[in-house]
Image (cartoon, rainbow, N blue to C red):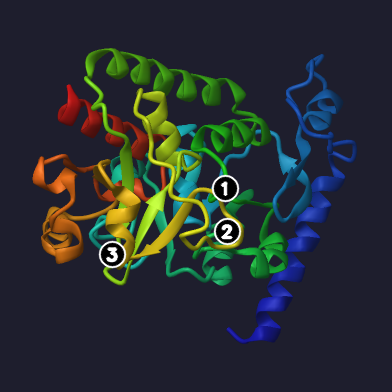
């Protein structure tokens, strides 16, 4: 299908959508719970049919108050949506790797996706608008950060269905879950998800013995070392479990875009940075951890000599409800 035909289809979708929305002319609210008190009349239902949502790519009107067919154009956002029991029918997938199943869905929530019959919308980081259109979504949810940032495709996606894009790199997964719950009319479920997580944190915190040394949350990039700060999602979770998370030395590392969740250091500064901290590796295979700690700049660290090196799991680079739960399980097993 060439560009002219695709634009014609978008115009057709827009015309049909306009006609349907005209049937509920008073539809858009200003957010909040659109389930207004109804008297059973058609007018009452129409008034509760849509809402206006402010998100990280703008403001979208006529968002279904109770969406039925959500397509996720962000494999990162899909995990957050599944935890909310949102009606996801299809999701973007990444090329299969050690952190995904054979479809390209993240392993921490691939079972939930299978249980909910979530299809692969397309594979790759650039939205395939034509395939999204064929899925007939009533709502599209995606990211405005990360590799799957869909902001430059926002207008094309919005021609298919109301589209909401969110940053996921500078907020906790709990805050993002709460925001999605509010915007999708799933506030109750969002509260339940966060409460279940908090309960689990309390149980494990009471059952583990936290080492006296600080915890250095690290990734070995071979040419550099990434250190996650106490402000990172991983750092916040470890802090909630009672750990003292290492604060990287100020002014000695490099950050990206003014972000406060991590800093990068050259390999030569590993010793000066980690010092006596225990080493907790984020998103590595066991083989990668073994190789890292065998190199000269790592092998003489107190944590390596004292066997205070821990594997937090491959799925801990970006946390959602599922991967956060897996991280807690790893901590319980290592320190329980």
Which quarter of the figure has residue 123? bottom left
Q: For the residue carrying disc 2, how many other residues have a C-alpha within 10 Å: few (<14), some (14-19), or many (20+)?
A: some
Q: Are marks 2 and 1 in contact (CB under 8 Å)?
A: yes
For label 3, the SS is: loop
The count of marks equals 3
State the residue at coordinates (78%, 27%): 45
Q: Which residue is mark 3?
A: 96
Q: Which residue is mark 2?
A: 145
- Label 2 vs 1, first from the N-terminus: 2
Q: Using the rendered image of the protein, determine whether residue 154 is visible from the camera's viewpoint.
A: yes
Percent x, y of residue 121: 45, 61
* 305 w.r.t. 142: above or below: above
* 236 w.r.t. 303: above or below: above
The label nearer to you, 1 versus 3, is 1
* Distance between mark 2 and mark 3 Cα atoms: 21 Å
| Placement of the C terminus among the 4 image quadrants | top left
Label number found at residue 170: 1
């Amino acid at each position: 299908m060439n560009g002219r035909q695709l634009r014609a289809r978008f115009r057709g979708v827009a015309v049909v959508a306009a006609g349907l929305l005209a049937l509920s002319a008073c539809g858009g609210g200003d957010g909040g719970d659109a389930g207004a008190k109804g008297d059973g009349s058609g007018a009452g239902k129409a008034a509760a049919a849509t809402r206006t949502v402010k998100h990280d790519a703008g403001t979208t009107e006529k968002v279904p108050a109770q969406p039925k067919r959500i397509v996720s154009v962000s494999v990162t956002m899909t995990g957050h949506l599944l935890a909310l029991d949102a009606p996801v029918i299809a999701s973007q997938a990444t090329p299969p790797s050690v952190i995904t199943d054979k479809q390209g869905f993240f392993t921490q929530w691939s079972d939930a996706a299978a249980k909910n019959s979530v299809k692969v919308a397309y594979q790759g980081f650039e939205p395939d608008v034509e395939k999204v259109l064929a899925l007939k979504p009533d709502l599209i949810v995606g990211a405005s950060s990360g590799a799957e940032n869909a902001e430059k495709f926002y207008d094309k996606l919005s021609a298919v269905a109301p589209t909401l894009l969110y940053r996921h790199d500078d907020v906790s997964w709990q805050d993002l879950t709460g925001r999605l719950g509010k915007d999708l009319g799933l506030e109750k479920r969002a509260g339940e998800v966060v409460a279940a997580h908090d309960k689990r944190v309390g149980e494990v915190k009471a059952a583990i013995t936290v080492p006296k040394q600080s915890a250095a949350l690290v990734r070995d990039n071979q040419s550099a070392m990434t250190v996650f700060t106490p402000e990172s999602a991983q750092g916040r979770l470890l802090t909630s479990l009672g750990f003292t998370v290492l604060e990287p030395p100020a002014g000695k590392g490099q950050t990206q875009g003014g972000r406060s969740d991590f800093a990068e250091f050259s390999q030569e500064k590993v010793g000066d940075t980690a010092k006596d901290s225990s080493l907790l590796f984020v998103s590595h295979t066991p083989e990668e951890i073994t190789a890292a700690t065998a190199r000269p700049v790592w092998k003489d660290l107190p944590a390596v000599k004292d066997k205070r090196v821990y594997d937090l799991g491959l799925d801990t680079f970006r946390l959602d409800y599922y991967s956060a739960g897996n991280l807690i399980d790893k901590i319980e097993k290592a320190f329980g």
